[in-house]
Image (cartoon, helix red, strand yellow):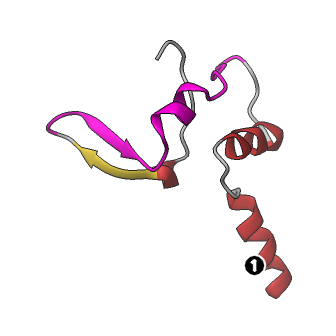
Amino acid sequence: MGHKVLIAPEWITGVNWASETVSIDLSRESVKDAPAYDPDKAWGRELDRDLYGHYGRTGYWADNAVLEVES
């Protein structure tokens, strides 16, 4: 699609080793419009928020915050 993007592992719905394909729970359009991955840029929570926000997903850190409060 012209640029590299990141996909969170939990969005993978299947792997077909024979055809070397991975199925994901995202639309082709949302992946196409995803921000480009820059391996030279340090990754952090802000980029996590941007990535999850782009895909309209709740971040994994939100689940951890609930668990910490409930403990």
Tell me if 26 is positioned left or right of 67 in this view: left
Please tell me in which quadrant of the rendered image residue 66 appears. Answer: bottom right
- Which percent across, then down, holds residue 44? 78, 38
Residue highlighted by disc 1: 67
The foreground one among 55 and 18 is: 55
The foreground one among 9 and 58 is: 58
Please tell me whether residue 40 is drawn above or below residue 63 in the rendered image: above
Amino acid on which disc 1 is placed: Leu
- Which percent across, then down, holds residue 13? 38, 54
Please tell me in which quadrant of the rendered image residue 55 appears. Answer: top right
Please tell me in which quadrant of the rendered image residue 69 appears. Answer: bottom right
Please tell me whether residue 64 is drawn above or below residue 44 in the rendered image: below
Q: Residue furthest left?
A: 18
Q: Which residues are magenta?
A: 18-40
Mark 1 Cα-neighbour bin, 10 Å: few <14, some 14–19, many ≥20: few
The foreground one among 24 and 71 is: 24
Total marks in image = 1
Taking the spot 67% from the left edge, 49% from the top edge, the residue there is: 56
SS class, disc 1: helix
Residue 68 lies in the magenta-colored region:
no
Please tell me whether residue 59 is drawn above or below residue 51 in the rendered image: below
Residue 35 lies in the magenta-colored region:
yes
Tell me if 55 is positioned left or right of 65 in this view: left
